[in-house]
Amino acid sequence: MDAPKFAVVDFKTTGLEDSDRVLEIGVVLLDSLGSVEGTWETLIDPDREFHSSGENGIAADDVADAPYFDYIARDFAELLRGRILVAHNLAETERFLRSEFSRVGVRVKDGGVGVSTQVLGKQCFSECSEALPACLTAAGAPAAVGDSALAVAVATATLFQLLLPSCKAAVSDAEVLEFPDEEFEQLEESGFDPVPRLESGSRSAACVQVLEQCERIDDPLLAPNEIAYLDALVQALVAGALTPQRRVELLQIATQQQLSPADIGALHEIFFSQIVLSAGQAEWIPALAAELGVADAIDSASDMPDIQLRAGDRVCFLGVLTLPREHWHRRAHEAGLIVSGLDRNDVCAVTGALGEHGGLVEIARDLELPVLDERAFANLIGHIASASSTVDHQQTVPPFDLSEMFPWCPPESGVNDIAAAVQHWLLEQASTPLVEISQLLDAATLPDGLAPTDPAVSTWLQHFPEPLTATVENLRELPGVGEVRIKRFVYAAVLCAYDQAITRQGEQIYEEAERPSETMDLAAGWLDLLGHWPDLEQIYVAQLAVPERLGHELAAATRPGERLVARAVNEIAALLHTDTKRRAAIIAGRATGAEHLQELGDRFGITRERIRQLEAALLKELRSDAPACETVVSACAAAFSPCASLDTVFDLIPSLGARIKPDTGRNLLEILTWV
């Protein structure tokens, strides 16, 4: 049997009481995969007085020429027969459906027939409200709903398309809508045509001018199918308001281009941001945002910083931006600016999510550099006098061999720019955690330019508190993210590594760079455990003239041996975060020979050979990936004779008696001896 198709329905009514009537019907027909097949809408004369309200937006004059329900009942039933009913508030929709058909002598099965996107949305996005716009936002789709019944049905169909892949079990429990044959045949073919609501199609001349003249930014991340959709979107907007019918046409184009509703939402955000950068705070911007379903993307006007840019000034760009990094580099060069990595001599830094902290943006703020968003930067460069001919336009970010920066991009891959590196990662490294893009990345750090408050980013962080531990395959499984946003996430991670690299190649701006390196920390701890680390009292007795700066450093480095031992404890504890119970038991039983392999195997229901393999793997990690443990062992071997008593060892280095948690029942010295 063929898979059932769907009918997404919404009603506008005179009220919510049992005596109230339907005023308007909107239907979107979907095939079994959720693709749009067609739409149907009509106003209905309720044959009673009613009050126009903000809920229905319909006046008595609007339905003066509309048919009664019984005139269109057969056509409406024909649309619904054999399809699964889908509605956002399914209970209310079914109630009015049964009520209207009962008035013309046709029964509709009570309850349990259709699918509620309100219920499915709550299951998938537990923290969002039940309102349709909130569910759309949580799902990453445009949150444009509109006033008419068809507009609501189109928005509901969009949400259903997003939910369908992850809610097939719930859909399989639904039943197709059927009407008793004899009752259906009694319905008359009235010949009345549907009377759709008249939609306002006007758009301000200023808005149309910006839309027509807005240069589509050459974004290297956009694929041909995404560009095709954006071109269709511009044509639809220039033609007039995004009526439900135009929205359906755009949905059909998106389906043809293999774009999900989440991808549509991401493309609307990108397009709207580009329009805002062109039009600023034009009065028609909020209305356009509502049409595109990106009202949350409207922010207050950027505060103009108290700086002035001049040709020859240095600026840097941090993290992912609304417009491509290449676009801003070109505009900065045309204005006579020098683009650099983050540097103390920069006049300002430009980033995407202005309110967020962390990464290089945080360092820029520590350096007291003005941190601007793109709109503020665009305003500043718009006031720069024509670039001086003496400015060296070639002075820019240092060139990099991407195959050296990113070893996963070998020279034979043909990768020669950041966008190509992103595409290569998506194709060849989809199962690799994003943190492995570069050694400069921290798994727990969200790349600069991404806002945690963005719904898609929030979903990412909810599932992966350390965001860069996620793979592209992981991200593809998250609801409401989509391929367009995944590309942006990977792009942000690659840019984060790139920005770190070009910054490190320039001046050392990190405070951490002035501190001892990791190897020097190990060396200082080793010397201290051997008794060769001087303290300030010894220096004072020796009457040595210590420079003030070194005195502060020595004071801060008191007892580096204790820090080294604490680090060794942390290295062992970190290894116990994986397979905790078995690894802790192996350490407890094998470090002092208290348990044999067979005893441990019996406890966990595995063979003694498997226990031996687990022990060998644990020892290998401790010997190869625990530099502090290795250094402590070396220091102890040099400081104590093989026959030294435990009391002697613990008197000199008490911290070797620290117990390892999760509790192994063994102290650090016992474990290091075993290692």
Image (cartoon, rainbow, N blue to C red):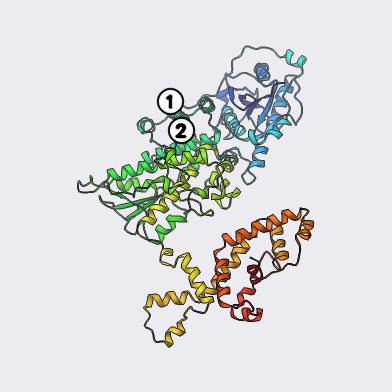
Whole-percent x, y for residue 209 in the image: 35, 31
Mark 1: secondary structure: helix
Whole-percent x, y for residue 662 in the image: 68, 64
Left or right: residue 293 versus residue 573 is left
Whole-percent x, y for residue 312 in the image: 25, 51
Which amino acid does the dot numbered 2 rest on? Answer: Ala
Residue 557 visible to the viewer: yes
Alpha carbon distance from label 1 to label 2: 25 Å
| Label 1 vs 2, first from the N-terminus | 2
**Whether residue 342 is situated above or below residue 178 in the rendered picture:** below
Q: Which image quarter is the N terminus in?
A: top right
Q: Which residue is mark 2?
A: 223
What label sits on residue 457 in the rendered view? Answer: none
Which amino acid does the dot numbered 1 rest on? Answer: Ala
Crowding near the residue tagged with mark 1, few <14, some 14–19, many ≥20 C-alpha atoms within 10 Å: some
Residue 452 visible to the viewer: no
Mark 2: secondary structure: loop
Total count of labels: 2
Q: Which residue is mark 1?
A: 239
**Toward the viewer: 431 or 367?**
431
* Residue located at (66% from left, 78% from top): 646
Location of residue 99 (image quadrant): top right
Left or right: residue 327 versus residue 461 is left
Crowding near the residue tagged with mark 2, few <14, some 14–19, many ≥20 C-alpha atoms within 10 Å: few
